[in-house]
Amino acid sequence: MPIDPRQLRRGRICLAVFPFAPAFPVELADASRVNTVDEWAHTHKGKPVKLVSEARLRPILLLHDRTRPEHGDAVCVRVNTVKQEIRRDPEVWRRIEAHEHPSFFHLPKAIDRYKLREDSIIAISSLGAVHRSAILAPTGGELSPHEMQIISERLAALIELDLAPKIATLARELLARGGYVRRTSTE
């Protein structure tokens, strides 16, 4: 049964089947293999092809509220359990724990509101879409609005999102509403 869209809220941690990004060579559903992206392009010429992909039921962080019924995808980032390898570099681990690392956001299991069984990290670069039918349920965990702001800022930096024109337009509108500047006839 699909999850109720009203449960899909920005900042919530949910369990979902999150696919791994395929890497070449890939195995197709008919058991054949494609070794390179060039081979794929030449052989399939832009037509859809079913392929074998790995996925795991894992925590995800939802990045927006709900989905419209006609669009079943929810945009999210993957939540990983902290592995020993990541703790081996003391400077990297210090930056992760201090929330200074641009690619990770630490979710300690000791913070009850995250509702995670183990220390985890949000992998900022693992941005993806999961169909609503692949979301099992919210774990009950969630991030605060301040933490979500940090995640948003890191995502904007990661994908080099240029927000300056939008911010400038909003600033002009606020100044005009406050009476600090006049609106011109071209606005």
Image: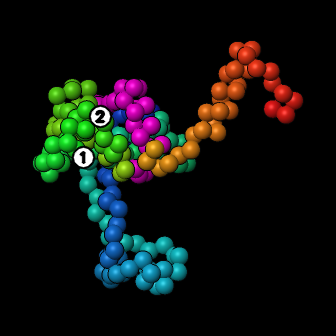
Q: Which mark is residue 99?
A: 2
- Residue at the (16%, 38%) spot, across then down: 118
Can you see residue 139? no
- Residue at the (42%, 77%) spot, across then down: 37
Tell me: 101 left or right of 186: left
Q: Which residues are magenta?
A: 127-156
Count residues near mark 2 (Cα–Cα under 10 Å), then give few for <14, some for 14-19, many for 20+: some
Tell me: 9 left or right of 29: right
Count residues near mark 1 (Cα–Cα under 10 Å), then give few for <14, some for 14-19, many for 20+: some
Query: Whole-percent x and y of residue 126?
Result: 36, 51
- Residue at the (20%, 37%) spot, across then down: 94
Q: For residue 15, what is the image quadrant?
A: top left
For numbered disc 2, what is the local secondary structure? loop
Q: Is residue 139 one of those drawn in magenta?
A: yes
Which of the image's four quarters has the C terminus? Answer: top right
User: Quick one: 142 or 17, which is closer to the camera?
Assistant: 142
The residue labelled by disc 1 is: 80
User: Quick one: 117 or 176, which is closer to the camera?
Assistant: 176
